[in-house]
Amino acid sequence: MGDPEDRPDARRNAPPPLYPEGAVFLAPLSDYTDLPFRRACRRHGCRYAFTQLIEVGSVVYRNPRLSTLLRRGDDEPWLGAQIVGADLDRISQTVEALNDRPFDVLDLNLGCPVPKVTRRGAGAAMRKTPDLAAACIEVMVRRSRVPVTAKIRILDDADPAPTVAFARRLEDAGVRALTVHGRTWERGYAGAPAAEVIRAVAETLRVPVIANGGVVDAASAAWLRKASGCSRLMVARGAIGNPWVFEQIPGAGDGETGVPAPAAETPARDEVCDELEHHVAGMVELYGEGIGLRIARKVVAAYLRGRGFARDLRGQVNTLSTWQEFAGLLARLRG
């Protein structure tokens, strides 16, 4: 691959890095990373976070839920928004609409493997249309008042060249940073990330590369940093029901939260219950009791999973519909 300094457009011509070395991000997670979820992660040291994935059509057609999903808390020091779509006009309109929102970056998703996204030629399917992917970035750069970034999956587990070529197209189109998930579209979330492919991208691009895939604790974070050569990491599914993961990764905190790092990898039962109560209370405040508790069921289940709580208590989660029911469950969980 060669050292990037050997290229005529070497790193000396790159813009200032968008993110500091060692930055750790909360990924945009559909149906999860709303304001209460991000605040839970923030309480445990997460500075950089993204909204849930935003489908461009929901912005263009003014989905009534959008305002709630895009809400930024006064206590959030940094927030990015990620959009997904393959229609240039809709992307342009979406960026124009989001310019009125207090986001720090706009990110284009080029890695989502969900069929309802890829069937429309968006997300991970855009690896098949690199010219369109680059055009989408160019439109975003022209329209956006904030820096534009992108998130991709690797294209081949064994050969870095296709992923590197795709990444360079996006860099040339104007992305200021690139997140690389180290699994292919076909692999979904199975197996270990191909960190050597991420490394090849990082060694080629001038902009910061963020390594993503399989980060669930301190050990997996350390492995991905070493194997990929990237100090910047993105935590995705490893944060669901586990905001403590940000305490466990050195460098995740920003010095403002007072969170020690690294922390114990297994929080005590009372600590889990306290955090769960905070999280669900935030959801009820944001959505209202009925909708909030219904949405919270999967969140509660995630906090309880694998932590030794009784099976019969876990079984009550799927029927939660009032705060009183949740408070009763919480009391039983505390024992």
Image (cartoon, rainbow, N blue to C red):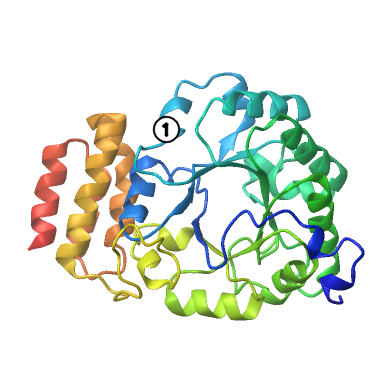
Please state which amino acid type lies under the numbered disc 1: Arg
Name the residue rendered at 65%, 39% in the picture: 84
Q: Nearer the viewer, residue 327 or 174?
A: 174
- Residue 17 lies, with reference to residue 219, above or below; the image says above
Q: Is residue 314 left or right of residue 209?
A: left
On the image, the x and y values in percent for residue 216 come to: 45, 69
Quarter of the figure that contains the C terminus: bottom left
Q: Is residue 83 above or below residue 187?
A: above
Q: Is residue 198 above or below residue 136?
A: below
Q: Residues within 10 Å of mark 1 (few under 14, many from 20)?
A: some
| Left or right: where 176 falls relative to 62 | right
- Examine the rendered structure and indicate whether residue 223 appears above or below residue 281: below
Residue where numbered disc 1 is placed: 71
Q: Nearer the viewer, residue 4 or 265?
A: 4
Q: Residue at x 29, y 76 (%)?
A: 264
Q: Secondary structure at mark 1?
A: loop
Instruction: Tell me, yes or no, if residue 255 can be seen here.
Output: yes
Name the image quarter holding residue 293: top left
